[in-house]
Image: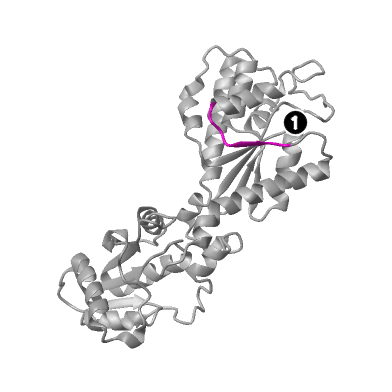
Amino acid sequence: MFSNVVVLMTALVPTVGHVNLINFANKIGAITHVIVSERSNEPTSGKNRISALYNDLNGKRSTTRFHLHSDDNAPQNPDPTLEFDDQFWKYWETTIRSFIGHPPGKIAVVGSEPYCAIVAKILGGVYVPYDVGRTIHSAKGTNVRENISRHWTYIAPSFRKHLSLNVVMFGQESVGKTTMAKSTARDLYNGRFIPEWARLYLEQPEIGPEVTGEKMDTITLGQYSVELNTINDPNYQINVFDTDLLSTIGYYRIFGGKNDDINGFYDQIRRQSDRLYILLPDDIPFEPDILRYGDGVRESTYQFWKDLLVEFGCNFVEVPRGLDIRRKRIWIHEEIIWHLNDKYRPIKEFTRE
């Protein structure tokens, strides 16, 4: 076993390949040094990359040392044929030594790129190749950045939360929120439908549909718990909510709740920058339901829900009126895809020199 193992990476989008590379290094050395390089103009911070890689390690966290190397002028993309470019390699020898020092025992440099062999040589160590032919993990980091949706499962699970999009169907009762949420989750890549927690709760025979202040307190806690559990699930790129905590706040107000900041969630909602609200129009016929309390009509207005979104500073779009179901679905899907592309554009367009 090597006393120290060195792994170099940028991991602009940390992948399962990066995680497995570190796990492999941990198997052959007593201490693994992972040096992650970043530049100030990059679309993802080195701190977030390291956090994701650390969280996804398969044990041996105590013997893995992560080092963040920040230098906008660091030389990149070494040419292995330039082995005698003293200035280039001296920079990296000095940088690596600043993190690992001169430890006793054998040093190994693990990686899939040819330059790792030269790094091992200048450190007086041994080069240990890993997945050079990309047979274990076929997608390179650059390929993942170019098409995040198609390569979703290649991204390190703990980093996916930075790239996922949470969509909330929002508005009055009986405007098609559930229908649109289900179809959107079904039709979009890596999508998942999350039902309204309050409906599942109030439909239980032993609980009943009557709304009380005590039940609303329980509903807010239940909805909040559902959102935390689903948003942090790395298996889905798009979470489509039939309702969310802000919807619950709205109904609490409609039902005459006295304590506006129920369960202290107002600040929590204002900090939610990870979701897109789809405000649906009331241009379809009202359908009675045991959990609709307006005596045959909607008990709230379109403006009420729009004002709520504005009050909490939410990111939202308004679906045009007069669209049939098919065109409404297409409009919503295109809007979500646009927001996803806008979210990923800095990552897909970024290239190192």
Q: Quadrant for the C terminus, please.
A: bottom left
Q: Is residue 55 left or right of residue 179?
A: left
Q: Is residue 215 left or right of residue 353?
A: right
Residue 199 position within the rendered picture, expressed as x and y whole percent measured from the top left = 68, 29
Query: Image quarter for residue 127?
Result: bottom left
* Tag 1 residue: 281
Residue 254 position within the rendered picture, expressed as x and y whole percent measured from the top left = 65, 16
Residue positioned 52% across, 14% down in the render = 259
As drawn, 107 above or below 195: below
Residue 350 position within the rendered picture, expressed as x and y whole percent measured from the top left = 47, 62
**Residue type highlighted by circle 1:** Pro
Query: Image quarter for residue 226?
Result: top right
As drawn, 40 above or below 96: above
- Color scheme of the displayed model: one colour
Task: Provide the major secondary structure of the magenta segment.
Answer: loop
Query: Image quarter for residue 8?
Result: bottom left
Of 62 and 167, nearer the camera is 167
Q: How many marks?
A: 1
Residue 34 position within the rendered picture, expressed as x and y whole percent measured from the top left = 31, 66
Q: Which residues are magenta?
A: 312-319
Residue positioned 21% across, 65% down in the render = 99
Residue positioned 38% across, 68% down in the render = 23
Would you say residue 265 is visible in this rendering? no
Of 224 and 123, nearer the camera is 123
As drawn, 227 above or below 205: below
Residue positioned 20% across, 68% down in the render = 100
Does residue 351 belong to the magenta stretch? no
Would you say residue 9 is visible in this rendering? yes
User: Quick one: SS at disc 1?
Assistant: loop
Q: Is residue 111 left or right of residue 145?
A: left
Does residue 313 belong to the magenta stretch? yes
